[in-house]
Amino acid sequence: MTVTDLVSYEDALASYDPVMGLEVHVELGTKTKMFCGCSTELKQDANSQTCPVCLGLPGALPVVNEIGVESAIKIGLALNCEIAEWCRFARKNYFYPDMPKNFQTSQYDEPIAFNGYLDVQLEDGEIFRVQIERAHMEEDTGKSTHVGGATGRIHGASHSLLDYNRAGIPLIEIVTKPIEGAGARAPEVAKAYVAELRELIKALGVSEARMEMGQMRCDVNLSLRPHGREEFGTRSETKNVNSLRSVERAARYEVQRHAAVLSSGGTIVQETRHFHEEDGSTTAGRIKDNAEDYRYFPEPDLVPVAPARDWVEELRKGLPELPRLRRARLKEEWGVNEHDMQSILNAGAVDLIVATTEAGAPSDQARKWWMGELARNANETGRGLDELPITPAQVARVAALVAAGDLNDKLARQVIEGVLAGEGDPDTVVEKRGLKVVSDEGALSTAVDEAIAGNAAIADKIRAGKVAAAGALVGAVMKATRGQADAARVRELILEKLGVEG
């Protein structure tokens, strides 16, 4: 089936109800792996961060990472889950080259957190509750690099390279209950859920949750059922989707694809699917006709985990303000509407604006610079706002220079440009580029006199009462001073010299 074989989204929803299940894997930001002392530092030489434990060598015994367990409990509490009084790890047996032990240490029927929910806000302000089935601990696999093929996948490759540095990094898998009732908004709900979950994970400080780096990835399970039917349809599972936009696109595409198959009398194949960013399509991966038998059995080398209740309650009391509540508070404090707050959230600017206000800038000025000049630069350079080489403290300093009258907006933009170019902090850029506002009254008076003398016809119009024409003289003075004059003071001087009331 190709993209052109799809039915329209509207036609799909006219006959079928989407049902989704979202499985999100989060790499925890621990310093060491889940069951050994190997470093989790990124971008090291291949296979340089391994040991007998994470390589599964005979006789090597694992030990549970306490911070990994603590992080799992924090996530469970923030998702309104019950925290197990007793749980244990299991071996999930399957063969794949990136699994050095030929099994994954995970949790099966005894997860550490279960039966929770997360309320997510859609773009129009509607709140949709997503029920959480479970959140459990496990370890990540290694990384396979397939060489010689055209697509980077194993099919067509001449050989594969294996890097086990990632094998054993702590993961939390968060699984929703079936998401029903979203209707046409199902793809939007999927995106909003993953976005809210990402913000929650970041707020907890347990992971940077950078999807583009694989620190957080989502499997989108989707099925359709005819209106009025209770039984779920056959599902597909689109694996490892790694951006919010892609989560929404994958869900939408699968709705249209399923509907096209079903409407033509076909049968949905239960399978994994690959998402293609370039056109938003999915293609078949591995068939899953029957439930896979991973031959789970309790991990004999690890003792059960039994979190003390006083420890769980201590962690509960230490939870930060959750993202949705924090956004509601900031929205009121900043005096912005829902649309503007959503734009700030989408840009990833909330924390940057907060940090800039904490550094002394008024919130409206912090929003102005991050959502204006800096957002423009980020878009042009293909970076996130948090990747720009400028700090909230530096943005606050630019705002302070403007408030003090040392810079106008035009000069401030040049200062920001210099900071981004690596020329130093704002004061250094101002000094090096000579960007301070010309505030010397004598110099301004001379520049105004020259502008009036050089534009006699415009001066006569102003004397005749056409005050709006003063803008042309202000422009002439600003040009003469290379934009370094105080435009408001220049206008005052022009009107004074021409004997006109402002």
Image: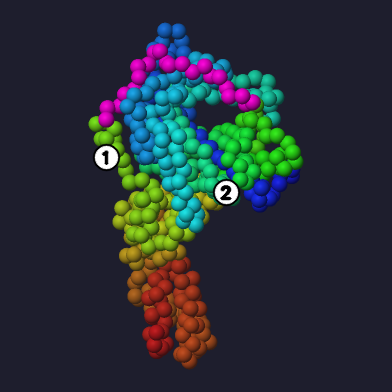
By secondary structure, the bulk of the magenta-drawn segment is best described as: loop
Q: Can you say whether 85 is above or below 443 in the image?
A: above
x, y percentage for residue 35?
39, 20
- For the C terminus, which image quadrant? bottom left
Q: Earlier in the sequence, mark 2 or mark 1?
A: 2
User: Residue at position x 36%, y 34% from top?
Assistant: 82
Q: Residues within 10 Å of mark 2 (few under 14, many from 20)?
A: some
Q: Is residue 306 magenta?
A: yes
User: Residue at position x 41%, y 88% from top?
Assistant: 500
Q: How is the image coloured?
A: rainbow
User: Residue at position x 53%, y 43% from top?
Assistant: 180
Provide the residue span drawn in magenta: 288-309
On the picture, is 267 further left or further right than 412? right
Q: Nearer the viewer, residue 441 or 289?
A: 289
The residue beneath circle 1 is 317
Q: Is residue 401 magenta?
A: no
